[in-house]
Image (spheres, rainbow, N blue to C red):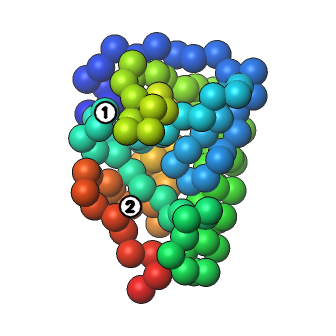
Amino acid sequence: MLAGLFAATVLSCSTLVAVDGDTIRCGTERMRDMGPGSPNKSGYDAPEIGNAKCQKERLLGEQAKLRLQELLDQSGTRVEDSGRRDRYGRPLVVVRLANGMTAGEVLMREGYAVLWVPGYRADWCG
């Protein structure tokens, strides 16, 4: 697992909320969940909600958000900070479940997200 290659700091969040399928809010700060990826090199991408290209993408994005929230609500879920930030300045984090899997791995396995690499944008409207 690539995510294990960096020294992670486990964050303490007063609240943990899914903003969309790959963004969370830990307390008041928005963070980008990179799943099983490596900071700024790979991760996962979920359909957009606010900037969706079509209604289908928006609906898929809402479903991904709901599923991510279910994962965030599970007992033993923790947020690991990579110490890096994305191009928007959001901390890059890994949401790790009690069983050791990442939320990104679950979302990709269940079809709510796809593997992401720089320059790639999934077509959720096709």
Lateral position of residue 122 relative to residue 76, left or right: left
Residue type for callout 1: Pro
Picture quadrant where residue 56 is located: bottom right
Residue projecting furthest to the front: 88
Q: Nearer the viewer, residue 113 or 97?
A: 113
Q: Relative to 58, is 85 above or below?
A: above
Q: Which residue is mark 2?
A: 114
Q: Position of residue 103 (x, y in %)?
A: 51, 43
SS at badge 2: strand
Q: Relative to 109, is 15 above or below?
A: above
**Residue at x 48%, y 23% (from the top left corner):** 80
Q: Which residue is mark 1?
A: 39
Q: Nearer the viewer, residue 76 or 90?
A: 90
Picture quadrant where residue 74 is located: top right
Residue type for callout 2: Val
**Residue at x 46%, y 82% (from the top left corner):** 125
Observer-side mark, 2 or 1, equals 1
Lateral position of residue 98 relative to residue 86, left or right: right
Earlier-in-chain disc, 2 versus 1: 1
Q: Quadrant of the N terminus?
A: top left
Q: Quadrant of the C terminus?
A: bottom left
**Residue at x 55%, y 26% (from the top left corner):** 79
Quick check: can you spot residue 91? yes
Residue projecting furthest to the right: 14
Q: Position of residue 118 (x, y in %)?
A: 25, 51
Q: Position of residue 25 (x, y in %)?
A: 65, 35
Q: Relative to 44, is 29 above or below?
A: above
**Residue at x 70%, y 33% (from the top left corner):** 16
Quick check: can you spot residue 74? no
SS at badge 1: loop
